[in-house]
Image (cartoon, rainbow, N blue to C red):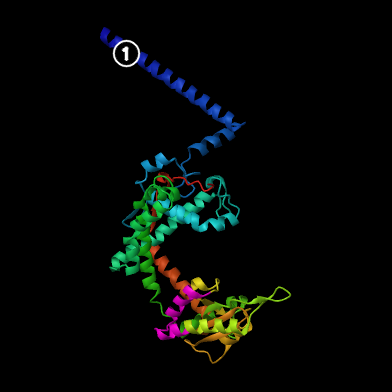
């Protein structure tokens, strides 16, 4: 009996201690809540309750999960191999995501700055006008994940179809490390990874960049394979025009709009000359003849070879003095009868007798132009073809992402920083 009494007393004492501890904890929490409310400027109980609810309500698993995804380099390295997203059987790590993120930043920098973003300040501290409530970091991140989704989904479809990489893309991947190492060392970096981290942030290595390139190349090969097989028939063009006639008309396109002309040229610039009394350069007949001879020699060189449009483009890239078209192999596309070009040049391509493959020399105030006629097509037909191909391209991408949905764990995303102000 005495032992039971002692046990009961001991139990009662324990209960008192527990109750007292709970009371202290409740008091401590109350004091903590009061401190939070005071710091937050809360004046009423209802405001305080709303604050607590906001603080303890879990965020949705979307791009707004974190106000900032940037972490210090050591934390980025520690978490670089953690999976943050999946598409089918493929996984995306933090390190790989950084490549997509920073490539997306660089690709969209001009647009972002035009829209008011200051690239010298943290992206997460600047609201993005293209998002309902997000900042520029969330904008770039969402777009980066979308890019990975599209290319990874197409890469998985390529694997299913047994599609092999074209030789040029395979060589690009095979030589990637050697070429980038050479670039890194010649640019003053101690190693290839040093270059990668300077451009893509801490926690990112060449292996992450290589994974990005492989997915991109395989995905691109799949897209190009399917896109190149699209056939646009005359009936498809007619149907598209009928369905979009009003929209096309608003853009100035009707069946009476005329033609688009595609022309390539190689400008051999006139050289020499003397200044007249007004300071204007005047060229002699000898100067013009020397220019013509030079142009004719290059034309003869082309004619002696395969003389295809491709070989003409190669010559233009090497020899043309026209910086506006040189990189494009001398191509001027979608010229019209209203294009503001010098008259001799314009008269040549507007000649109704022109057919694909025509060539010749044209003299203008700039020198002699070696001309190549590529095509003449009705404007409405070209615009409708572009619309059809755009719809088909969108269909290829849509089918891929629908076949392999994207799943993201935003809580695990950690991005290394790159200081763009330097």
Residue 199, magenta (yes or no): no
Q: Is residue 232 left or right of residue 38?
A: left
Using the rendered image of the protein, determine whether residue 21 is visible from the camera's viewpoint: yes
Number of residues whose C-alpha sits closer than 10 Å to that of mark 1, classed few (under 14), some (14–19) or many (20 or more): few
Residue 115 is situated, as x and y percent measured from the top left of the image, at: 60, 56
What residue range appears in magenta?
A: 299-320
- Of 13 and 83, nearer the camera is 83
For image coordinates 55% across by 27% down, the residue present is 35
The residue labelled by disc 1 is: 8
Using the rendered image of the protein, determine whether residue 87 is visible from the camera's viewpoint: no
Residue at the limit of the structure toward the top, as seen here: 2
- Of 361 and 41, nearer the camera is 361
- Of 223 and 118, nearer the camera is 118
For image coordinates 41% across by 80% down, the residue present is 231
- Of 274 and 408, nearer the camera is 274
Residue 54 is situated, as x and y percent measured from the top left of the image, at: 52, 39
Dominant SS of magenta comes to helix
For image coordinates 30% across by 9% down, the residue present is 6
Classify the position of the N terminus by image quarter: top left
Residue 212 is situated, as x and y percent measured from the top left of the image, at: 37, 56
């Amino acid at each position: 009996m005495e032992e039971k009494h002692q046990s009961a007393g001991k139990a009662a004492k324990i209960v008192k201690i527990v109750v007292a501890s709970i009371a202290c904890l409740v008091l401590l929490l109350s004091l903590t809540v009061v401190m939070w409310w005071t710091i937050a400027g809360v004046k009423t109980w209802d405001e305080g309750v709303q604050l607590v609810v906001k603080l303890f309500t879990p965020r949705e698993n979307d791009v707004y999960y974190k106000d900032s995804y940037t972490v210090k380099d050591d934390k980025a390295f520690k978490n670089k191999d953690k999976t943050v997203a999946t598409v089918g059987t493929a996984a995306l790590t933090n390190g790989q995501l950084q490549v997509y993120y920073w490539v997306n930043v660089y690709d969209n920098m001009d647009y972002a700055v035009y829209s008011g973003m200051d690239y010298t300040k943290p992206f997460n501290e600047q609201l993005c006008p293209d998002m309902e409530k997000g900042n520029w970091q969330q904008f770039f991140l969402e777009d980066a994940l979308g890019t990975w989704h599209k290319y990874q989904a197409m890469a998985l479809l390529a694997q299913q179809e047994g599609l092999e990489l074209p030789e040029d893309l395979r060589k690009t991947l095979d030589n990637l490390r050697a070429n980038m190492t050479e670039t890194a060392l010649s640019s003053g970096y101690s190693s290839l990874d040093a270059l990668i981290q300077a451009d893509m942030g801490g926690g990112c290595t060449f292996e992450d960049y290589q994974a990005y390139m492989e997915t991109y190349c395989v995905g691109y090969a799949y897209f190009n394979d399917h896109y190149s097989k699209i056939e646009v028939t005359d009936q498809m063009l007619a149907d598209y025009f009928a369905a979009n006639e009003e929209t096309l008309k608003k853009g100035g396109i009707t069946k009476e709009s005329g033609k688009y002309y595609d022309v390539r040229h190689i400008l051999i610039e006139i050289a020499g000359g003397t200044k007249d009394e007004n300071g204007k350069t005047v060229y002699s007949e000898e100067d013009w003849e020397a220019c013509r001879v030079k142009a004719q020699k290059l034309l003869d060189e082309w004619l002696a070879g395969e003389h295809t449009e491709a070989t003409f483009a190669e010559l233009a890239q090497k020899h043309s003095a026209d910086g506006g078209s040189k990189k494009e192999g001398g191509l001027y596309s979608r010229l019209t009868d209203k294009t503001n070009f010098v008259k001799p040049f314009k008269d040549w391509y507007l000649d109704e007798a022109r057919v694909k493959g025509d060539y010749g020399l044209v003299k203008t105030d700039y020198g002699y132009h070696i001309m190549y006629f590529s095509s003449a097509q009705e404007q409405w037909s070209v615009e409708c073809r572009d619309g059809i191909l755009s719809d088909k391209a969108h269909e290829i991408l849509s089918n891929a992402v629908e076949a392999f949905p994207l799943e993201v764990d935003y809580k695990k995303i950690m991005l290394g920083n790159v200081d763009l102000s330097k």
